[in-house]
Amino acid sequence: MRIRLVPVLAVIVLSLPLTVTTASGGPKPIPLPISLATVIPAPAEAETETEGFRLGPETVIGAAGAARPIAEQLAAALRPATGYELPVRSGAAGIDLLLNKGADQRLGDEGYALTVRPGGVELRANRPAGLFAGVQTLRQLLPPEIEADSVQQRDWVLPGGRIVDRPRYAYRGAMLDLARHFHTPAEVKRYIDQISRFKINHLHLHLADDQGWRIQIDSWPRLATVGGAEGTGVRGIGGGYLTKADYRDLVRYAAERFVTIVPEIDMPGHVNAAQVAYPELTCDGVAPRPRIDIRVGYSSLCAGKEITYRFAEDVIRELAEMTPGPYLHIGGDEAHSTPHADYLAFQERVLPLVRKHGKIPAGWQEIAQAPAARDDAVVQYWNHEGATAPVVAAAGSGAKVLLSPANKAYLDMQYDLLTPGGLHWAGTIEVRTAYDWDPGTLLSGVPEESILGVEAPLWSETLRDLADLEFLAFPRLVALAELAWSPRATHDWDSFRMRLGAYGPRWTRQGVRFYSSPQIRWS
Ligand code: TNX
């Protein structure tokens, strides 16, 4: 047996120049052979060996205790295409999932070590989240046909070697805007399935905006029944809201995939739908007309009225009650019609309400102007003109900064001016633009220790159905997932685009309608 021990990049660089000339004269890419070095996001350390592990009808998955549900997920993912039984049992087996219970310091809470040898596969992690991440890696090591939902006649070989992997940032996020167009729980679940495969671990749901309100709140029932009625949304298309049962079901579904839901109610601007339902939330008490256009910055809660804070606390309390995750997002962006002093007065009362109800407050970067946006608060940077003085100051006094620079991370920006869907106010974002930046050094004045992670927002002014969402999210979301997960040392565009190109057939098998960017050589 010839053993090759080579770092990730060497393997990929070796594979780069492989092209053959076709009869028509054009270069045709040779598929990148699957190895432990072709995984996306790139693992922290990977050593490849020539001999791998062959799955067969007799393969058993071994797992006990808290490892067991993850082993069951793995088995369920591999059964349809292989046709193998893949029983899960406690005790040593062909593929073993083992919990170290904190013994391996290098791996932290979400890291894992995966070893593939001809005699068997061992996946170790300190905690279930690490096993889940390792399972996502393992699935990428099998051929793309593994994504099929019917039995495929072929060999199922996991390439040999060892990966030791852990994330660069604790928060790796995606955001969906349910307000501008409602997306059903089934669509949100499908999105969770997709993002969790790239080790994204937070899904931020933008649940209310000028055009619609998308979550049941018992103490203010008309928010959902009026604000989420049929015909609410951009151009009056669609409508709908999540009942509390829907929301709890989404939280549970996400948790099974190690994704934490972060709910957002945007205040004090972006509140027209709430004011249509409850005109007493305006300063003059007059109901505004429902809005189906995409303008921003015209609506505001009334900082001088007590009812504003009763509303805010009721909503925060009910959201906190149904959200096990640590964060609650209160928006705070683009409050152009809230006088500045009112904005500050509003935030000084509302940010503490989030803490009162047991959650860490998160908000768009504008909240950094309020002194209460300190300590453990999360400030989400979305601008693309560099950190503002308040953002630097907030980071300096303990706040964490979540990076969503609009000109790199906004999935609703068009790829180029000819691709369908999306906007372009922050520019166009091809795959390379989404990939080629460093979260650790993006904001001068904000040290890397203050960076919580990266989040990719998908605003849905122009997006109706799942195909629209998928086209804008994929493949760019993967670029952002890699920035958030992989160590800086693995950053390499040529490597990334080869690995991404090799992933394409998996999406095709799954029916994911991704954008086949001309920057990528798709297998
Ligand atoms: C800006 S950036 C917004 C949203 C829009 C989005 C469209 C930010 C926090 N707010 O209200 O939907 O642009 O790209």
Image (spheres, grey):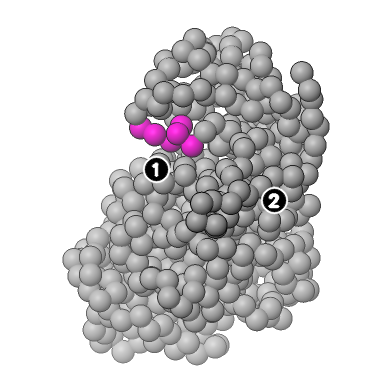
Nearer to us in this view, 389 or 521: 521
* Distance CA(mark 1)–CA(mark 2): 29 Å
Q: Nearer the viewer, residue 380 or 63?
A: 63
For numbered disc 1, what is the local secondary structure? helix
By secondary structure, the bulk of the magenta-drawn segment is best described as helix
Three-letter code, disc 1:
Gln
Q: In the image, residue 157 lies at what x, y percent?
A: 57, 24
In this picture, residue 521 sits left or right of residue 321: right
- Residue 124, percent across and down? 67, 26
Residue 491 in the figure: left or right of residue 290: right
Q: Quadrant of residue 404?
A: bottom right
Is 163 displayed left or right of 60 in the figure? right
Instruction: Give the residues drawn in magenta, as a range.
Output: 144-149
The three-letter code of the residue at mark 2 reads Pro
Q: Nearer the viewer, residue 518 or 218?
A: 518
Q: Residue furthest left?
A: 230
Marks 1,2: beta carbons within 8 A: no
Q: Quadrant of residue 199?
A: top right
| Residue denoted by label 2 | 17
* Of labels 1 and 2, the one closer to you: 2
Task: Give the total of numbered labels.
Answer: 2
At horizontal 41% and vertical 23% (from top left) the residue drawn is: 153
Can residue 382 be seen?
no
Question: Residue beneath label 1, please?
Answer: 510
